[in-house]
């Protein structure tokens, strides 16, 4: 939690890596943390095991647009509660040029910029979080995925508006090799790392004593 709070305090876009074995609570940690933080709008994609890149990109595109629909619905409700119905302007959906990861993240960048503009224009106290869960599942279908994602980050996100960009994966060996301990690519761009491990006996007993 301290690492997430530190990332929140940054004034620019920040990349975070979260990794650990399956069923340890990575997705739960991120979902619950930002669900309780009303100052964020959450966009989430999940890599699909053994699925071709083209199909994954199409699924990611569809899911982001569903999140845009959710944002528009929330924005309309907020403005209606303030008696500002006439000022509601729907955030437009960007188009996807092609079914490559470069095209998807270009689309995502434009979408996040559109959301950010709407947030500013309506004086909402919100930041945007992008959660890319199961990154290794996306990477297994694409050559040199980590370096390509690093180039995408430089082109579309780094040095631009403040966004939290969270990369998460259950294939801990891939996350460590390609992101955490990589000599280039994402390692130099990923400022915060959160390795999740199972509780040891002492930690479990301390937790249960505090809870019960």
Image (spheres, rainbow, N blue to C red):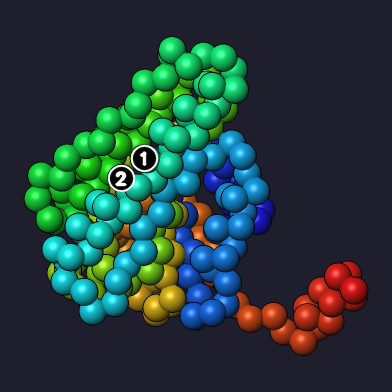
Task: Indicate whether 19 appears above or below 161.
Answer: below
Pointer 1 residue: 68
Q: Residue at x 54, y 79 (%)?
A: 23
Answer with left or right where residue 32 lies relative to residue 13: right
Label 2 crowding class (10 Å Cα cut-off): few <14, some 14-19, many 20+? Answer: some
CA distance for labels 2 and 1: 5 Å
Query: Which quadrant would residue 159 be assigned to in this image?
Result: top left
Considering depth in this image, is 194 or 105 the residue closer to the camera?
Answer: 105
**x%, y% of residue 173?**
39, 79
Considering depth in this image, is 5 or 35 the residue closer to the camera?
Answer: 35
Pointer 2 residue: 65
Q: Is residue 150 visible?
A: no
Q: Residue at x 52, y 29 (%)?
A: 77
Q: Which quadrant would the N terminus be assigned to in this image?
A: bottom right
Q: Which quadrant would the C terminus be assigned to in this image?
A: bottom right
Task: Indicate whether 144 appears above or below 109.
Answer: below
**x%, y% of residue 151?**
22, 49
Q: Residue at x 40, y 29 (%)?
A: 116
Task: Indicate whether 204 appears above or below 146.
Answer: below
Considering depth in this image, is 58 or 209 the residue closer to the camera?
Answer: 58
Answer with left or right where residue 64 lies relative to residue 194: left
Instruction: State the residue lying farthest toward the bottom.
Output: 201
Label 1 crowding class (10 Å Cα cut-off): few <14, some 14-19, many 20+? Answer: many
Q: At numbered mark 2, what does the secondary structure look like: helix, strand or loop?
A: helix
Q: Is residue 36 visible?
A: yes
Answer with left or right where residue 76 lies relative to residue 106: right
**x%, y% of residue 184?**
29, 59
Q: Residue at x 32, y 67 (%)?
A: 47
- Answer whether labels 2 and 1 touch (C-beta < 8 Å): yes
């Amino acid at each position: 939690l301290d690492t997430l709070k530190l990332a929140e305090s940054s004034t620019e876009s920040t990349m975070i890596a979260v990794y650990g074995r399956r069923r340890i609570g990575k997705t739960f940690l991120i979902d619950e943390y930002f669900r309780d933080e009303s100052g964020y709008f959450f966009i989430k994609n999940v890599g699909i095991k053994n699925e071709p890149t083209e199909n994954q990109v199409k699924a990611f595109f569809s899911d982001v647009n569903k999140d845009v629909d959710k944002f528009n619905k929330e924005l309309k409700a907020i403005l209606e509660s303030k008696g500002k119905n006439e000022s509601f302007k729907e955030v437009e959906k960007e188009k996807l040029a092609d079914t490559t990861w470069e095209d998807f993240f270009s689309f995502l960048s434009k979408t996040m910029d559109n959301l950010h503009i709407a947030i500013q224009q309506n004086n909402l106290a919100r930041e945007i979080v992008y959660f890319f869960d199961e990154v290794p599942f996306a990477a297994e279908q694409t050559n040199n995925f980590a370096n390509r994602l690093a180039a995408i980050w430089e082109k579309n996100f780094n040095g631009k508006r403040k966004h939290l960009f969270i990369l998460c994966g259950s294939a801990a060996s891939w996350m460590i090799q390609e992101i955490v301990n990589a000599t280039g690519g994402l390692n130099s761009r990923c400022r915060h790392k959160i390795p999740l491990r199972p509780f040891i006996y002492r930690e479990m007993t301390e937790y249960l004593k505090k809870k019960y």
